[in-house]
Amino acid sequence: MEFQTISDNKRTFLPLLLLGDEQEDMIGRYLDRGTLWVLYDGGALRCVCVVTEEGGGVFEIKNLAVAPESQRRGYGQAMVEHVARQCRGRGNCLLAGTGDSPLTVPFYESCGFQECGRVKDFFPDHYDHPIFEAGRQLVDMVYFSMAL
């Protein structure tokens, strides 16, 4: 596995970023100010992650997406571990916000995150269309935290 930090032409990775956040203007709110890491394995792009520095020692995963053919093979967890290593020593907390989905909630918990809050009606209030994951409409944003 090879991790790379992308500084230029971040929008080249938009097709995969749209798997993690399916509205392009929402991605535009954090992509330029965030750090974009990509994970390649066997010469193929497997995973992308955008992390922002929120101040006060807090970093936030804004987008984490694994290519469909590479899902459930450990790439997402490897990326979270990489991000935590990169942020450790520069901050004290890593946050991740996600929909209340039976796919993403257990994933973040398995990576060592703990639920720390919710933003009621986040998805209907911020997206121009209903978002569904695993057959469930996403309504509230669930926040998770991990000590660094």
Image (tube, rainbow, N blue to C red):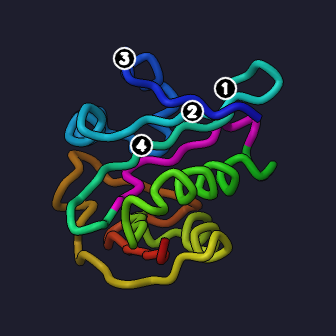
C-alpha gap between disc 3 and disc 1: 17 Å
Mark earlier in primary sequence (4, 1): 1
Identity, as a three-letter code, of the amino acid under mark 3 = Asp
Front residue (pair 130, 123): 123
Q: Residue at x 37, y 65 (%)?
A: 91
Q: Residue at x 62, y 41 (%)?
A: 66
State which mark lies toward you, 3 or 4. Answer: 3
**Quadrant of the image occupied by residue 98:** bottom left
Q: Residue at x 38, y 39 (%)?
A: 35
**Where is mark 4, residue-wise?**
50
Look at the numbered disc 4 and give the secondary structure of its residue. Answer: strand
User: Quadrant where the N terminus lies?
Assistant: top right
Disc 3 packing (10 Å; few <14; some 14–19; many ≥20): few
Res 8 label: 3
Res 38 label: 2
User: Which residue occupies the extreme front position in the image?
Assistant: 89
